[in-house]
Image (cartoon, rainbow, N blue to C red):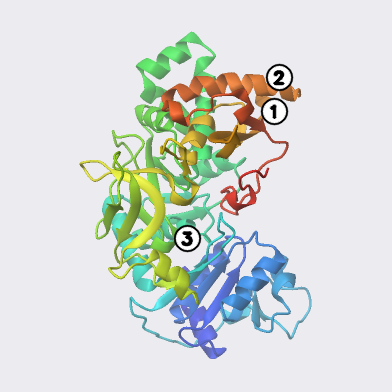
């Protein structure tokens, strides 16, 4: 029983000298021991510092030192990276032969002592180090109250219960995976499942009888494309998709997901409204969510069968949202306030003051607008906005989203460029060579350019690429954070 075992672990940690408020690092891929360990750390009154399992040794060492950690739980494959840092190391895996330098998780679980450490809502629970698309990782301090309020708000709006099986592709060491993929099902009495195996996903969903899938929008786009390819091969298939879409949806569940599937949850990037619309027509609900690590992290999400598209829904219960300094289109910075907002950045009061004002509003750095019903629409990040000579604002993410719908494009990065002394919009594209069916860059560029012109008709004229020279092909994928966001700071103006 996870509850009993984590209680034993908490008592063992106290016996090893871990005091309330001590920092304890967790460095491993998600697995059952990961969930057990973080619960044990929190029950001991300590502060959990979950590390991204994909961090390189030097990055991990820097964060461990920065966090002032007293102990670290580590998987065997990451042990070498942290062994010499001078703190208590607890291995999640048993080594071959005795080792006096290490403690082992399974030994600690034999502890029969009882411990009861009460923690208040304002007490620190987790320090989550962000990967940072701008190269500026920060330690986000999240309290027990931050998590409990966020989970409670999620469950007020989303119907999850003991009958549900929630399968997450979002790693638990990221705030989204921790809250939505682990804590929400725990609180609801549901079953939490994690996998990072995309290829075996349909089989895993069938075996676990998944009812809710949490995944990035790219996965849903791939699933959608497969559905369209299948039904598009025959006239009966095309007719079924348009006339009896729920029958098509039933087959999708049987072949690509789980017959018990209730709905999808998408987060981390914008979702193509057409994908959401057509899945809903097929009887498969899809929720689009929004949040940041600093808000524990969920702020808003739509309903599975919401008729509004392109929105991430209204703010969650108990939270407030407003738009600061809106322009003539109503677009401004999104500010939020509520019990889920972080305490601040660890040992970084200057950066904390930049985003948390005296009235408790957190400045998200995201630009967006609200409709009359309070639904939130995201345009992009404030720091990424391109201001043209005309004074018009261009949101790179908006253009990237449109261009990413082109099958010939694997990855795209939009940024400002110069032509004859004027600022223009440029798109750097890593092609999908398999879809293109050619290895000739000139042919590829022409094929992509024709598609760019076609999909750009939905954009305002000043947001469009106007010349083929503004479309630049790159020969390798863009560098990304562990959450698969492009590291924009590596691609500044004039660099590639």
* Residue 175's disc number: 3
Earlier-in-chain disc, 2 versus 3: 3
Q: Residue furthest left?
A: 372
Q: Residue furthest top?
A: 235
| Between 210 and 61, the one nearer to me in the picture | 61
Q: Nearer the viewer, mark 1 or mark 2?
A: 2
Percent of width and height locating residue 395: 45, 40
Q: Residue furthest right?
A: 97
Left or right: 328 in relation to 173: left
Earlier-in-chain disc, 3 versus 1: 3
**Residue sitting at x 48%, y 49%:** 167
| Between 111 and 384, the one nearer to me in the picture | 384
Report how far apart the C-alphas of labels 1 and 2 lie in the structure.
11 Å
Percent of width and height locating residue 465: 53, 27
> How busy is the neighbourhood of tag 1: few (under 14 within 10 Å), some, or many (20 plus)?
some
**Residue sitting at x 61%, y 46%:** 197
SS for callout 3: helix
SS for callout 2: helix
| Between 181 and 346, the one nearer to me in the picture | 346
| Total number of numbered discs in the rendering | 3
> How busy is the neighbourhood of tag 2: few (under 14 within 10 Å), some, or many (20 plus)?
few
Q: Is residue 480 visible?
A: yes
Residue at the disc numbered 2 = 443
SS for callout 1: helix
Q: Is residue 92 visible?
A: no
* Residue 324's disc number: none
Report how far apart the C-alphas of labels 2 and 3 lie in the structure.
43 Å
Up-down relation of residue 447 to residue 139 (above or below): above
Left or right: 374 in relation to 188: left
Residue at the disc numbered 1 = 433
Q: Residue furthest front?
A: 421
């Amino acid at each position: 029983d996870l509850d009993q075992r984590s209680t034993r672990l908490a008592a063992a940690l106290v016996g090893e000298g871990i005091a309330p408020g001590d920092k304890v690092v967790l460095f491993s891929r998600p697995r059952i021991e990961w969930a057990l360990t973080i619960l044990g750390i929190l029950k001991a009154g300590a502060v959990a510092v979950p590390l991204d399992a994909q961090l390189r040794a030097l990055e991990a060492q820097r964060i461990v030192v920065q966090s002032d950690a007293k102990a670290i739980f580590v998987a065997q494959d990451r042990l070498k990276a942290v062994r010499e840092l001078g703190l208590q190391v607890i291995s999640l895996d048993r080594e071959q032969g005795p080792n006096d330098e290490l403690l082992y998780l399974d030994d600690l679980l034999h502890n029969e002592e009882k411990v009861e450490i009460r923690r208040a809502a304002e007490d620190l629970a987790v320090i989550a180090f962000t990967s940072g698309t701008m190269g500026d990782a920060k330690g986000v301090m999240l309290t027990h109250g931050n998590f409990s309020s966020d989970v409670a708000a999620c469950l007020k709006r989303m119907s999850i219960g003991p009958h549900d099986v929630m399968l997450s592709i979002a790693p638990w060491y990221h705030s989204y995976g921790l809250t939505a993929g682990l804590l929400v099902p725990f609180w609801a009495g549901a079953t939490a499942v994690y996998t990072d195996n995309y290829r075996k996903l349909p089989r895993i969903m069938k075996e676990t009888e998944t009812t809710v899938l949490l995944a990035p929008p790219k996965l849903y786009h791939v699933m959608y494309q497969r559905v369209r390819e299948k039904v598009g091969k025959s006239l009966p298939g095309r007719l079924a998709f348009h006339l009896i879409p729920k029958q098509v949806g039933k087959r999708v569940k049987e072949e690509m997901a789980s017959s018990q599937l209730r709905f999808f949850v998408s987060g981390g990037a914008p979702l193509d409204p057409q994908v959401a619309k057509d899945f809903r027509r097929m009887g498969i609900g899809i929720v689009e969510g929004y949040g940041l690590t600093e808000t524990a992290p969920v702020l808003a999400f739509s309903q599975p069968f919401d008729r509004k598209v392109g929105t991430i829904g209204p703010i969650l219960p108990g939270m407030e949202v407003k738009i600061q300094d809106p322009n003539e289109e109503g677009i401004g910075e999104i500010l939020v306030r509520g019990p889920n907002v972080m305490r601040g950045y660890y040992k970084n009061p200057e950066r904390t003051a930049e985003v948390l004002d005296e009235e408790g509003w957190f400045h998200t750095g995201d630009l967006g607008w609200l409709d009359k019903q309070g639904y939130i629409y995201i345009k992009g990040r404030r720091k990424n906005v391109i201001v043209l000579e005309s004074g018009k604002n261009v949101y790179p993410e908006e253009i990237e989203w449109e261009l990413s719908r082109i099958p010939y494009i694997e990855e795209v990065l939009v940024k400002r460029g110069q032509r004859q002394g004027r600022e223009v919009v440029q798109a750097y594209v890593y092609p999908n060579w398999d879809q293109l069916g050619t290895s000739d860059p000139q042919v590829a560029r022409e094929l992509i350019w024709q598609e760019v012109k076609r999909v750009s008709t939905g954009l305002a004229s000043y947001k469009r690429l106007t010349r083929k020279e503004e479309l630049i092909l790159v020969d390798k994928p863009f560098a990304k954070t562990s959450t698969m966001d492009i590291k924009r700071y590596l691609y500044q103006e004039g660099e590639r």
